[in-house]
Amino acid sequence: MFRSLINTELHSAMATGQASTKPPDANEYGGDEISALVLDPGYSTTRAGFAGEDVPKSIVPSYYGLIPSESTPKHAKKLFGDNSINIPLPRISISNVMSKEGTVEDWDTAANLWEYTITSRLTNTKPTPLASNGLNDPNEDIAMEGVEEQEKPLGENPLLMTETGWNAGKDREKGIEVAMENWGCPAFWLARNGVLAAFASGKPTALVVDMGASTISVTPVHDGLILKKAVTRSPLAGNFVSNQLRLLFASSQPPIPITPHYLITSKTAVDAGAAAQATYRTFATGTEPHPSFRHFQEERVLTEFKESVVNVWTGPGRLGGHSPQGGTNMDVAKQHPGKPFEMPDGWNQMFPAIDRYRAIEGIFDHKMALSDANNPPPSPGQTITALISSSLSQVDVDLRPHLLGNIVITGASSWYAGFTDRLQQELQAAHPGVRVRMVASGQMVERKFGSWIGGSILASLGTFHQLWISKKEYEEHGPGIVEKRCK
Amino acid sequence: MMGSDARDVLGLPSAGPPKPATPKVQKPKVRGPTGMSREVLDLKYEGAPPISIVAPKFKEKPKLPFKPRPWEETPFGNSARKDGLILRHWRRKGDVSNAAALPVTPADSNAASEMEQDEKAATTLSDSHWAKFNVKVDKPQYTDEQYETHLKNDDWSKEETDYLIDLATDFDLRWIVITDRYEYQPNQQPKENEDSMAVTLQAKPRTQEDMKARYYDVAAKSMVLHNPLSSMSSSEFDAHEKMTKYDPNQERKRKMYAEQLMNRTDEEKYEEEMLLKELSRIVLNQEKLFNERKALYDRLGTPPGAPQTHSTAMYQSSQGLTQLMQNLLTQNKNKELEKKEKRRSAMGAEGDFPGGPSGMDRGQRHSIGGGLDKRFSFGQGGPRQLSAREEQKYGVSHPNERLTGGVQFRHERITKAGQAKSGVQTSRIGAALTELKIPQRLTMPTAKVVTEYEKLIESIKTLLEVRKLSEKLDGEIKVWQAQKEQQEAKDRGEEVKEEEPSQTVENEEEDEDTKEIDEQAERRRKAEAEDDDEAEDDDEDEDEDDQNAEGKEEEKEDSDEEVSAKGSNKDEEEDAEVDENFAGDQDDDDEEEEEEEGEDDEDEEMPDEAEAEAEVDADNNDDNADANEEVEDDGASSPASAAPTTRGEGLRKRSASVISHVSNKSSKRQRR
Ligand SMILES: Nc1ncnc2c1ncn2[C@@H]1O[C@H](COP(=O)(O)OP(=O)(O)O)[C@@H](O)[C@H]1O
Ligand SMILES: [Mg+2]
């Protein structure tokens, strides 16, 4: 299986002997593309693209807009894609097809969203093959057959889909049902996103730390297979940091309001700390967007803030600890420079370093997390270091040093300055006897789309051809085949 | 754009007022050395950056000497697949260099029919050249019969064995993954005899070693079944050898060690390194070291008490070394005391001088603590957080009660535990220990072992006490019987000679003899007072450790007081209330260990240390004190000769409580 495919191609080629009297030629190590598609649904975005490419061409928010219709409340209009869900249409509300657990919550809408993701950017732009587009065919019957084929959006593309390490049972089978029944894929495969992220870093064995939007997960991968029982996760990911920022803004004196872009009609520049001078948009009663819309728009502002201002404290020690020179690290952090940020309404301020560190410190040190009634304080077991230790403690002792030497960092939320250094420090302190090494790409896209890229590599490998679950196999065995094949 | 620019572009002569000459015009006059490109020159002589104006022009179409071969989307099959899936990839038209022929099976016919239109003569389909990488592990094969005769195992049902073997082949013997995915549910198996299977079987927890052991066992045996050892090829034989040699216990042990090795802290690593270095150094310099040591002993002068030989053999055991150290210490202390005396007399009334030896100790410990601090403080600021494992290792405890007492070493605790108040008792404890085959000097006195050892000694003491008590009771019964007989005789008017009660008591030891009489008397007196005193007793027992020494000293002076009388019979009381003492002891232990941690000394400890010393003194004087007690107790015994019934009751009560306590203890020990 995987081992012979991914790791030791050369080895097995020599071992089998049957077909290899002559040495394998160079392109046996490369890919063999079959126009497969790779679909990687996450909580914040859903990524799709052709296997063999290095970034997904289609990135669509996993959030969708709902516009309730007055006449038939059941038939609410669903809006997909950045271009439509960011417009404050009357009474628009925003939901997510994924659950906070990182698994699919609303399968019908998810199927719609994914189809939109694929067809809006990928397959529609691809011309139908000349031979079967009906124009060159004198025979009418064949043309009709062709039309039938065309009704299914992915009739020609094998599809590789990703899932989380803890996805189980019916949720796994739903994917193949949608791909085969709705889209008519000739072949399908379901891969764990941890494994794919490891492949993207060129590691068949690794400990994958994925900092997504809703969950942070630690997945031990051995020879291209996840160790299911040792997968750990907690909600201290991107959305947690956003909520920390909300708490931080609310607790500052005076409180800092987050006004999303759609509420601003015009603004004038103001000095740092001065009150915003902007005219705000108002909505006629009955046409206001749902609060979920505002929350979603605030999230975009906060993501911007996270990208430009938030930093990870890189020690020595923890932010809540003592510095080796005496005194607390908090005092040391006060000496560090701040960073300016301007809200959409023009309000701006220099954010002191202590706040910049504080917003994310809770991920490493539960005691430093801010909390209120709606945001309960995290437990000590939820911090990233605790997740890693508990995951490690559940794998074989012989594997642990190897995993610690190959810690793959992926997910957009790991892109904070200092994140990797800090994690390295914490882990090295916790495991002094082992060499801890991080494998973290310095490229934003590789970090953001780690699991998609891994899928792209896998689905374009020549050796992967024999793994696909074909339509025929699906028809023979039913959706249960996923459990048997995609281990 | 200005008009002049347009003119410029068009190359027309300028109209209007003449423009001042631009510096650009003068530029070309500056000539550098030839052979330098214009761009480089421009960097040297500053001026406007060079702008190359290149007219946009498409690249010329290459004139190829051959006709381009078009690419086409070619369908292909894969012989490694059984379902005849046809995928398409882009290939050069007519490129069949690495396409092996794949016959179309009837199952593929409908899939192939579509393809037939693409390729004119489509009887063959190119095979993916990746197919050959599909390798599988050989699955051990066995029939039901073979299983029954050769592979049966009480721990593994056939179903579970099958499951294991399937899983192992599925995951190509990647044991880490197999262990992770192992989810055998025994209730899936077909139920043959319903009544015995009424209870759903619980899945046995299987470790990786269990699985490996079973798999290798089955695989090796089935290998032999299919191919007897004699006809195996060498590689097969090797595999068979490896599988039969697998030892799960050794693997388990190895993993345990590996885990311990991984969990080492920096300090432990450092310590280990140092120890290894030290060891190699010692091994290297052993000879030299012995010589040096001998020279040192000679220089120091053989300590008094040691035989006047010049051999160092007696110091090479740890026992010998301790003795030497003790000797040297007492020498030192004596000198110190002398000095102190001298100084005190010199200083006269100038004020209190802090205690000599204890003061010195304090200084020393400070320096040790400082050294430790330095060593343990690298990398981390502030106090270090110890993990639970480290706390256990260093013996750190977090007791809730206030602790008493100063620093104590474990070896002191051991010797103290083994010592009873009287020499006879001590030797009896020793005898009991030898009977239990426990050395008097523990080979590995870790904190845990010492605590257990102390518990054991406590129990032995209690047992001895009970034995003594029962002997005493026997004696007493005899005495009273004799008295009763006397009384009866008297009543009958017979004249009977006075008899000393103690003569009826059987005694093996001389010194115990007299003591026991005293105790008897004491008991009688106590039995009367017991009810009243009980509450008071408890209080006193709690403080006993502290009062010990004081009590001892006091008792010499005011023997009439009850406190002192009790102090004299301390060991009995201790036993009767072992529970409390026991708790107290443990607290003490905890504290000792904390002290060993090198925590800062507090002033409070001073008196404790003094006390401890006093106790040592008291111990040394034990025999004398005992002698004193005897005399004193004789006096005390006389008033307590009334009301035999009450006495008897008190005794019975007391012995009963002791016995029940002992039985509790022994059962506890058994459980342990
Ligand atoms: N440059 C950045 N720095 C920090 N956080 C970021 C950055 N870009 C995106 N994020 C956060 O990362 C999360 C999305 O991460 P991603 O790995 O795409 O999640 P998912 O796989 O769950 O969709 C969001 O919470 C977003 O706010
Ligand atoms: Mg993700």
Image: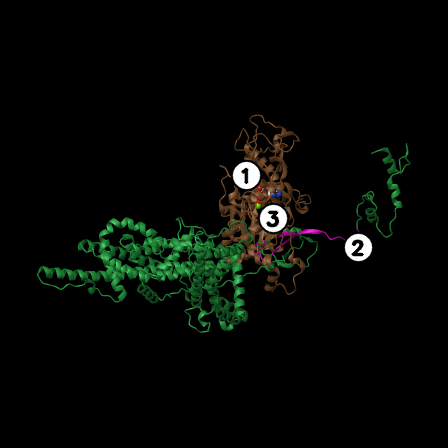
Chain colours: A brown, B green
Identify the element where label 3 is drawn.
Answer: helix
Percent from the top left, x then y, of residue B348? Answer: 44, 54
Cβ–Cβ under 8 Å for marks 3 and 1: no
Mark whose residue sits in front, 3 or 1 = 1
**Image point 59% across, 27% down: which residue?**
A283
Chain to which the residue tagged by mark 1 belongs:
A
Residue flagged by tag 2: what amino acid is it?
Pro
In the rendered structure, does residue A304 fall within the stretch colored magenta?
no
Disc number placed over residue A243 in the picture, else none: 1
Identify the element where label 2 is drawn.
Answer: loop
To which residue does mark 2 refer?
B65
Q: Is residue B298 visible?
A: yes
Residue flagged by tag 1: what amino acid is it?
Asn
Mark nearer the N terminus (3 vs 1) = 1
Mark whose residue sits in front, 2 or 1 = 1
- Please indicate whether residue B611 sits to the left or right of residue B21 in the image: left
Percent from the top left, x then y, of residue A196? Answer: 58, 51
To which residue does mark 3 refer?
A450
Residue density around tag 3, few if under 14, some if 14–19, many if 20 or more, within 10 Å: many
**Ligand 2 neighbours mark 3 (CB distance < 8 Å):** yes
Residue density around tag 1, few if under 14, some if 14–19, many if 20 or more, within 10 Å: some
User: In front: A373, or A224?
Assistant: A373
Residue most extreme to the left: B493
Disc number placed over residue A267 in the picture, else none: none
Q: Is residue A158 visible?
A: no
Locate the N terminus of chain B by quadrant: top right
